[in-house]
Image (tube, rainbow, N blue to C red):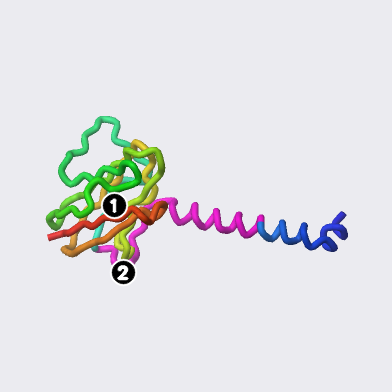
Amino acid sequence: MLDNIRRNPLILGAIAVFLALVGIVSVFISRNAGPFISPQNAGNTKIETQPGTTNPNNTISAKNTVDIKNFSFSISTLTVKKGDTVTWTNSDSSVHTATADDGTFDTGSINPGSSQTVTFTKSGTYTYHCSVHPMMKGTIVVQ
């Protein structure tokens, strides 16, 4: 049987495609497994919660909250003060992220009905996107 597989280029090609797909999927899953703050920017932000945590008591304040719904961020540009926390709440049917374009923060996957927060400790303008749906974009201005 092994000789038949070696002689048939279609079977070899199918096996190669399958292995490539498995590799791509495993890289995608590992990239979206949790929050990431690059070492060179670790002082810029602080992740307050772990990926997938929920807020069963609905204690999130409306201030500095970005709702994710209909594959968009509810506030395109949010201005906060240095030291403020921003909360992204996923009210959509799909998993989303809030991922800084420059890598300074990444909420990791935010499941439907869950929230993630980031505390901004340095002034600046932080553009971000959803790594699952890159057309979703937003900006946090920290004064």
Work out which quarter of the rendered image holds the N terminus and state it.
bottom right
Q: Nearer the viewer, residue 13 or 47?
A: 13
Residue stretch in magenta: 18-43
Secondary structure of the magenta portion, mostly?
helix
Task: Examine the rendered structure and indicate whether residue 25 appears above or below residue 124.
Answer: above
Q: Residue at x 37, y 47 (%)?
A: 96
Q: Residue at x 16, y 59 (%)?
A: 142
- Which label was assigned to residue 40? 2
For the residue labelled by badge 2, is the local secondary structure a helix, a strand or a loop? Answer: helix
Marks 2 and 1 sit apart, C-alpha to C-alpha, by 16 Å
Q: Residue at x 28, y 48 (%)?
A: 73
Residue 106 is a magenta residue: no
For label 1, count other residues whose C-alpha is less than 10 Å away and answer few (under 14), some (14-19) or many (20+).
some
Name the residue type under label 1: Ile
Left or right, 132 with respect to 90, comes to right
For the residue labelled by badge 1, is the local secondary structure a helix, a strand or a loop? Answer: strand
Q: Residue 74 location, x and y as percent? A: 24, 45
Residue that mark 1 sits on: 47
Q: Residue at x 66, y 55 (%)?
A: 18
Q: Sequence order check: which comes first, mark 2 or mark 1?
A: 2
Task: Examine the rendered structure and indicate whether residue 82 appears above or below residue 63.
Answer: below
Q: Residue 100 location, x and y as percent? A: 31, 60
Q: Residue 32 location, x and y as percent? A: 43, 52
Left or right, 77 with respect to 95, comes to left
Name the residue type under label 2: Gln
Residue 36 is a magenta residue: yes
For label 2, count other residues whose C-alpha is less than 10 Å away and answer few (under 14), some (14-19) or many (20+).
few
Task: Examine the rendered structure and indicate whether residue 131 appears above or below residue 95.
Answer: below
Q: Nearer the viewer, residue 104 or 79?
A: 79
Left or right, 32 with respect to 40, comes to right
Q: Residue furthest bottom?
A: 40
